[in-house]
Amino acid sequence: MTARPLNIVPFVSVENMMRLVNAIGVERFLTELAGVVEEDFRRWPAFDKTPRLASHSIDGVIELMPTSDGVTYGFKYVNGHPKNMREGRQTVTAFGLLADVGTGYPELLAEMTILTALRTAATSAVAAKHLARADARSMAIVGNGAQSEFQALAFKALLGVDRLRLWDIDPWASEKCARNLSRYGLDVTVASGVEAAVEGVDIVTTVTADKQRATILTDNLVGAGQHINAVGGDCRGKTELHRDILLRSDIFVEYPPQTRIEGEIQQLAADHPVTELWRVIAGEVPGRRSRDRITLFDSVGFATEDFSALRYVRSKLAGGDFHQDLDLLADPDEPRDLLGMVHRAAKT
């Protein structure tokens, strides 16, 4: 195989990401991606870890999410602008990069709007595999925007969840979600309200978008033994759950220094006990302690999950046509002669 020129970086565009997902199949993609996410959680101590760098405005937030395992460096650029939906734009968009730590040279550039939806859902399902009751088969999804179908399919693929109740303040969103899921053999019901959606289900996923302190779930709606997958609260000042739910739940998080700022637990004291998810996955501590305990995955998304997603995509590119070669790096014959390279280009 011919070596790739040093100035050329594989680029996975939106079109090629969609082609790749369709070629693999959404459920298989989610299952395989979940395996890589879980693998990287098991080697959590190998990663550099820092809370994401956030630039907040009145309209939303722009964030950078970096990490490295000492061999490969990765970062994601992502925004969260709830108002965008009213303007016909995506609430969340993203792109990401992998680079070689030894040289600093990029090795992959990829769209991550679609990929972030996939990795968020895969991470949710990985957490639930370790925290929900083993016989969990029913789930409510409160908030039926762009992430909702991916959550449903990840839980189907990894846990066998086959009964769904949907609810959103916008009935069109629930109808859209049900329509998109109709081809996957799921029993889907559009509920009349939050209470009807969550009553008696094994798992509750909240995935709303508004950048505000909200109470999507009140304490009286959460029953013994339920697993809560709280996805929507992911920045300072943005929550979905009533504080009383947190006080009677076993709480699991990705990276406490970030989650205490951005997650549901921003409502609690800074020393409120939480368990890091990687410790459960690595077998260091138990997850679900009894059938009747309420477990809560306070998910805000962490850079290692994006690293895993990019690593998975990179593994699927060899020998395929799911990327473009991007002339991204200046690479003169003589590294010290960058201006000479510019001059020579003028003669061609």
Image (tube, helix red, strand yellow):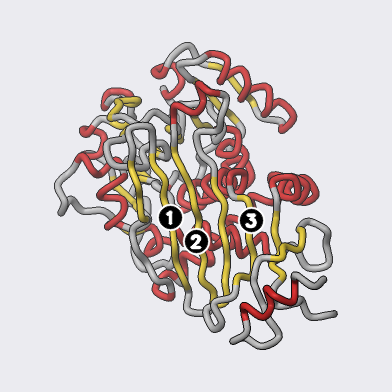
Query: Quick one: label 1 or label 3, which is nearer the N terminus?
Result: 1
- For the question of whether residue 36 can be seen, the reply is yes
Q: Is residue 48 above or below residue 219?
A: below
Q: Nearer the viewer, residue 223 or 318?
A: 318
- In the rendered image, which quarter contains the C terminus? bottom right
- Image coords of residue 334 (percent x, y): 66, 88
Q: CA distance from mark 1 to mark 3?
A: 15 Å
Q: Is residue 41 above or below residue 56?
A: below
Q: Amino acid at mark 1?
A: Leu
Secondary element under disc 3, as helix, strand or loop, is: strand
Q: Amino acid at mark 2?
A: Phe
- Image coords of residue 221 (percent x, y): 33, 24
- Image coords of residue 273 (percent x, y): 21, 53
Q: Which mark is residue 110?
A: 3
The answer to the question of whether label 1 and label 2 lie on touching residues, with beta carbons closer than 8 A, is yes
Query: Quick one: label 2 or label 3, which is nearer the N terminus?
Result: 2
- Image coords of residue 55 (percent x, y): 35, 47
- Taking the spot 58% from the left edge, 36% from the top edge, the residue there is 152
Residue behind mark 2: 75
- Taking the spot 39% from the left edge, 47% from the top edge, the residue there is 300
Splitting the image into 4 quarters, where does residue 217 fall? Answer: top left
Q: Which mark is residue 322?
A: none
